[in-house]
Image (spheres, helix red, strand yellow):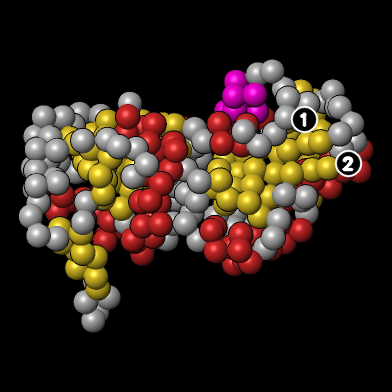
Amino acid sequence: MKTIVTHPSFDYMQEELLENPNIRVCQRQWEYFDDEEPHFQIQEQNWEIEYQDVTYIWDFSHTSKLFENYSAIRAILDWVPNKVRIIVPYFPVWTMERADKKWEAVTAKYLADILSSLPSGRSMKTSIHHLDIHNPVIKHYYDAWKVTPELHTAMSLIKEKISPETNIIFPDEWAYKRFKNDFEWYNIIVCEKRKEDGIKTVRVKEWKAIWTHGIIIDDLGLSGWTLIKCSDIIRDIWIQKCDAYVTHGRFPKESYKQVAEAFDTLYTTDSIPENIQRSEEVTNIEVLKIASLIQKIISK
């Protein structure tokens, strides 16, 4: 039997996770003091933690949640589980992933350092699991002597929504290199971002279009500028119906509304939990649930 502890943002996921008979959800109390600092405790006894295989689902959609998530995991590790598995579906891109100039702070490395400081369980190292992390090199920022980082993909979720005749459109070479193997048997169109006279543009670099349905595939959506520009050029030239899928629909400052207007359907996942509420507000946003992927990670 494997134990799951969720950050409150992911409590809605518990019902689906419990469909697996080998999973139980740990009963815990998660409250806040008057100064808004977290108050976390396991209810009654900690038998669901001690000597057990424990998975913690971390919500990293806002920087303010860093300390409360970290505190909960440290408490769990103090209760001597055999193994702790931390699932961080979204690793935030407010981090700097590399330094292009002297004195820039590579905050992705500092975040990895914080997570690398977590102790091991009684019998195994703590493992950190990410879905479609924005830059796979971040895996190497972790201290592999202390924790085991593992990368996973959520592309199987969107493949359940499309037909074999769908054109797969990558917004740039980076997305193409990352995910082309997930769509090996599909017709692929590759776009690229360029600067012409100081103005950012998008053009099609490589294509063999089928005149029906296309879907733009990427790992992350922020302002949505690239997605919208790709949609414009694809519709103008070939595709009648155009959707988009991003594993992590961050879309700050309500940019999700403008992005959704550019597509027949905007697909994303609940790696950002608030996307569920957004999909209730905007009818053509469809959220694909990651609970099935978490079950597979735990079972593995």
Q: Where residue 167 is drawn, which disc sits there?
A: 1
Looking at the image, is 264 positioned above or below residue 128?
below
What's under tag 1, amino acid-wise? Asn
Chief SS of the magenta region: helix
At a point 16% along the width and 29% down the height, the residue shown is 124
Note whether residue 239 is visible: yes
Task: Left or right? Give the position of 232 relative to 157.
Answer: right
Lateral position of residue 157 relative to residue 209, left or right: left
Q: Position of residue 149 (x, y in %)?
A: 32, 32
Secondary-structure class at tag 1: strand
- Residue type of the residue flagged with mark 2: Gln
Residue neighbourhood size for the residue with mark 1, other residues' Cα within 10 Å, grouped as few (<14), some (14–19), many (≥20): many
Residue 68 lies in quadrant? bottom left
Q: Is residue 210 left or right of residue 41?
A: right
Q: Where is residue 177 in the image (x, y as percent from the top left)?
A: 61, 25
Within 10 angstroms of label 2, few (less than 14), some, or many (20 or more) residues? few
Indicate the secondary structure of the residue bearing disc 2: loop
Instruction: Give the CA distance from mark 1 to mark 2.
Output: 11 Å
The answer to if 76 sits in the magenta stretch is: no
What's the magenta region?
A: 176-183
Of residues 5 and 66, the one nearer the viewer is 5
Return the residue found at the far right. Answer: 237
Please state the horizontal and vertical placement of residue 274, each as a whole percent of the image.
Answer: 50, 61
Decide which of tag 1 and tag 2 comes sooner along the chain: 1
Quarter in which the N terminus is drawn: top left
Quarter of the figure that contains the C terminus: top left
Apparent side of residue 267 relative to residue 269 in the rendered image (left or right): right
Question: Which residue, given by chain and number where applicable, does mark 2 sit on?
Answer: 240
